[in-house]
Amino acid sequence: MGKGDIALKGSRKRPWLELCRTETERVYLGSQVYQLRQAHPGPLEIFWDRLPTNGFYDLDRARIQTDELWRAYDLLYPRDERTLSRGVLDLCGLSGLVNLWLDHGTLVGRTGEIRKRMSPDEKTLLAAWISDLGFPVDMPRTQASQKLIIPPASMHRLKKSMRPLVHVTMRHKLRSKVS
């Protein structure tokens, strides 16, 4: 749901998980890889590299390969087409919502917004899932809108729930931007 991507790559078409972050978020990327290592029962192949960009900061990339990624690929890509399902969201739980927030969420005053490119069906599914987690969400009336709005009361409870799960280097995502 966040900045990670699973795809079949190489001549043997094995699943690879690719995580990309800017240089300024390298510590957080290292923390994500560490958590994957801790949760994974066997060895992981991890390849680190840096991708140049047109901006000031380059991207750090971690590419991860293990045979256990087949299960994740099967869940996310039934019939080899990306499909977000309620089962996948339920598996992610609150930690999945935290990662979605860190990658696509922003605070506008006391209101939260998740700005992510998604289809209307995915937007409806995400809104229902987040609401079922106990944080009611509003959807803009226009179908073209690519955001979900979290009202101030829900955002306050969500920040309290997310805080223990957010890496120290990403705590700035829980604060409103000052104009």
Image (cartoon, helix red, strand yellow):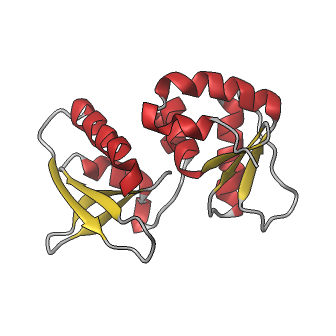
* 70 w.r.t. 27: above or below: below
| Furthest-right residue in this view | 141
- Left/right placement of residue 111 relative to residue 69 reads right
Residue 54 in percent (x, y) is at: 43, 77
Q: Is residue 148 visible?
A: yes
Foreground residue, 44 or 80?
44
Residue 77 in percent (x, y) is at: 41, 60
Residue 55 in percent (x, y) is at: 45, 72
Q: Residue 56 is drawn in which quadrant? A: bottom left
Foreground residue, 64 or 129?
64
- Left/right placement of residue 92 relative to residue 151 reads left
Q: Residue 73 is drawn in which quadrant? A: bottom left
* 8 w.r.t. 54: above or below: above
Q: Residue at x 70, y 40 (%)?
A: 176
- Left/right placement of residue 137 relative to residue 82 reads right
Q: Residue at x 37, y 42 (%)?
A: 28
Q: Residue at x 20, y 57 (%)?
A: 48
* 93 w.r.t. 73: above or below: above
Foreground residue, 132 or 4?
4
Q: Residue at x 63, y 47 (%)?
A: 105
Residue 20 in percent (x, y) is at: 37, 58
